[in-house]
Image (cartoon, grey):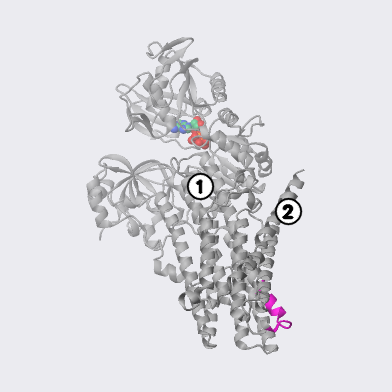
Amino acid sequence: MEKHWHQLDSTEVLNKLDTTEEGLSTAEAQKRLQEYGKNELQGKSRGPLLRFLLQFHNPLLYILMVAAVVAFYLGEYLDMWVILGVVLATAVIGFIQEGKAESAIDSLREMLAPECTVLRDGKQTTIVSSELVPGDIVLLESGDRIPADLRLIEGKNLALDESALTGESMAVKKQYDKLDKEDLVLADRSNMAFSGTAVARGVGKGVVVATGVKTEMGKISKFVSGPQKSDPPIMRKIREFTKVIMVGIIALGAVNLFVGLRFGFEAGFVFLVSVGMIVAMVPEGLPAALVAAFSHGVTKMANCGALIRKLPAVETLGATTVICSDKTGTLTKNEMTVKEVFCGDKNYAVSGTGYSPEGEFSRNDDTFTDLDGHTDLQQILLAGLLCNNAVLEKDEEDKDKIQGDPTEGALLVAAAKADISSSAKRQDELPFESDQQYMATLHHRDDDALLIVKGAPEKIIAMCHRKLVDGNEEDFDGDSAVKEAKRMASDALRVLGFAWKRVSKEQTEISADDLQELTFLGLQGMMDPPREETMDAVRRCRDAGIRIVMITGDHESTARAIADKLHIGHDEKRAISGEEVAAMDDDQLFTAVTDYSVFARTSPEHKYRIVTQLQKNGHIVAVTGDGVNDAPALANADIGIAMGVTGTQVAKDSSDIVLTDDNFASIVSAVAEGRHTFNNIWKVILFLLPTNGGQGLAILAAILLSPFLPVFSERLPVEPIHILWVNLFMSISCAIPLTREPKEKGLLKRPPHDPAEKLVNKVFLRKVSIVSVVSASAAIIMFLLYNNGVFAEPDVPTFAQAQTVAFTTIILVQTFYLFTARWIEDSAFKHSLFSNPFLLLGAGITILFQLLIVYAEPLFGFSPLRTEPFPAHVWPYILLAASPGFFLIELEKLYIRATKSNAAH
Ligand code: ATP
């Protein structure tokens, strides 16, 4: 019987997979990719046919289909065909819009495709995880998602979060030797790392043994969902609203049936009224228009550098009231340059900018690059060079560039400025973890061995009992170093402490216990300038009523100094430290999050608590994060924002948004886009719902008037066909262009919208009622005027002509309304008619189609919508009757503006 992977030792595994510790060659990997297929779990997306069929799974369409069957039995074949046509059209529109949204999400998914680090051709490279093949050597570090099933061959402090697979929430420590027992449960295969789990801490190296559906995760779940598809709150509110309407319609239908039959109306007519009611009141085109608005918003946000992983984020972003941001890289450039060195009780200044290794050292007006006679300076620079994982290299344009952590890059550059180099061999490493705040390495030199530690000054100082002064070790009490670190930090420098100790060359491994009784080498202070665009972004946030809270791992003084430069919490004197946060209970923190905007030396756990308390204060909180430990805060926040460049896969997986450029200004642009999208969605709702209201009212009025106006006891002023046409056609021709309305000026000068706000609020009720009443009364009045021969010509108006007039009136009321619905509060007269060409086009097409429909019979010899042409001289009257759809809403806006300015005074 073949042995399991965990039963083989690493050499056997490598042999069996025909690979080496150096990894596969690119050519071999290509070949294997053909053979084994992509490293993906199938069943992700639904096929187009299924997606199309699912469009019919919609209660509204069920009702319409029942209506079509009834029409068939009543012999109303035209009605039946039209209703079926509408059902089909609704499904097709839904299908197309959903397809567009899915392709927007798909292209995002591609941009967000998880990546992993592998050895190919002996070199470390980053590839898309789907291209991983058995035999690949994968390098792991904390925050990585395990991309395939791996047999681990080496590692340091490696512990995995396997809860996705085993349900066990504690991180599991890993080892690298073979295990003898054959039938171990997955949780006990401690030398394996399974796809879908994540690195909680440490680093490691593993060989891929299974990819795609062959992995343990693939075996368990045939279907793995892509980005989550929960609905935005506004969609949910609309669905609930539609449900209420449906219940209303069914009740009205029942009343109608009862009244109709009681008064002896014809069954066919009663049916017609019921169908009319149903189709009139339900906003058929609304969902498609909203999906259009959302997918447009997603695309716009992607252009700003914010990739949306979860659709609701588009709306929630617009409602954000607090942004909790990291400092390094988000507010600042993350381009570190060492500016000051403190060693041997002396201060040195370092000149130069960026990563260019050109610069000089100076002390007391003396400038030099040759460090002869400055032993302590040489040693601390050497420590920075060795205890380092970054690489300094040239890019295509021959510019100096850093591979790896910019903090470490700065140390390499500082050493390069003094021409310091070393041939020491690294034996072991305790990797940097942000909750430890230090990193340690062990090096063997020709005649000695060195253990070097660098990290947050207070951590390093606490590990030391001696200090290096002029090459000699002296007693060390730490006070002056602490003072110096504080001073450098208050100059906005990011300060790292350095220490070492000589150890025996016998020692080949290090652990945290070794980090004591060290010799203090000094401090290096580096500058990380704020990003230029941040200042403006911070100001825009303030105008938009959004508070900014800085939550950083850096020192209090550095954090406060940078915050001062950026005017974050500028009237606050100091920053709160993670230690203070830890000492506070939830009630104290509840107050502290309102009083302070800068939190320093925090760990991810503090971040989580701060976010929670801000939410308790009633805020909608967006929070940034990059590390594996940030995942809880990201998942818990209203909007979790992961860093696309420096962020770990786990952080990205837990977020709603991924920033492609890690830039704070992009968050603010995305907030503006969120508000813009939400504003347009609101316009679409306020535009489309009055159509339903108007038609519903028209039918209701006709029925109520039927005892006095017998003309309405047999037929309605508008037919269900017309209503369906208005609802569906207007939603495409006018409402979808409305989703493209340009951003209103001053959108970021208003306070954020309240997500708890009801859909049916005052503005909604007022606008929808005004336009509904205008639409219904204009249609009925025009119908009656025409039907009673008021327009003189023709002598004998037909009923169908009068209906056509009413139908046209409704279309025109909406068209008039469209031109004022573009601004919820602003007067239409203030803006150019041409600012949204799509809308003009949509309105033009609507009028053109209406002309075609009205005059279809003379043109084509038949009329698909049962219209009859009416004489041209009636048009001005229709325009006149429809125009209040524009002017009354303009008056309503005048009222809104007046009440607002009154309230302001
Ligand atoms: P932010 O959370 O705003 O990005 P940060 O980058 O300072 O701030 P961390 O990366 O958690 O936060 O770093 C916390 C502290 O750990 C730093 O202030 C520094 O003192 C220390 N530190 C950072 N990077 C390293 C490193 N590569 N090696 C050793 N210590 C480091």
How crowded is the residue under tag 2: few (<14 C-alpha within 10 Å), some, or many (20+)?
Answer: few
Query: Horizontal placement of 337 versus 894: left or right?
Result: left
Circle 2 residue:
895
* Res. 764 visible in picture: yes
How crowded is the residue under tag 1: few (<14 C-alpha within 10 Å), some, or many (20+)?
Answer: many
Amino acid carrying mark 1 in the image: Ala
- The dominant secondary structure in magenta is helix
- Measured from the top left, where is residue 237 in percent x and y? 61, 62
The local secondary structure at tag 1 comes to helix
Circle 1 residue:
631
> Is 895 or 663 nearer to us in this picture?
895
Q: Quadrant of residue 511?
A: top left
What are the residue bounds of the magenta stretch?
697-710
- Measured from the top left, where is residue 150 in percent x and y? 34, 50
Query: Horizontal placement of 86 versus 610: left or right?
Result: left
Rendered residue at 77%/43% (across/down): 905
Is there CB contact under 8 Å for labels 2 and 1? no
Query: Looking at mark 1, is its residue's CB closer than 8 Å to ligand 1?
Result: no
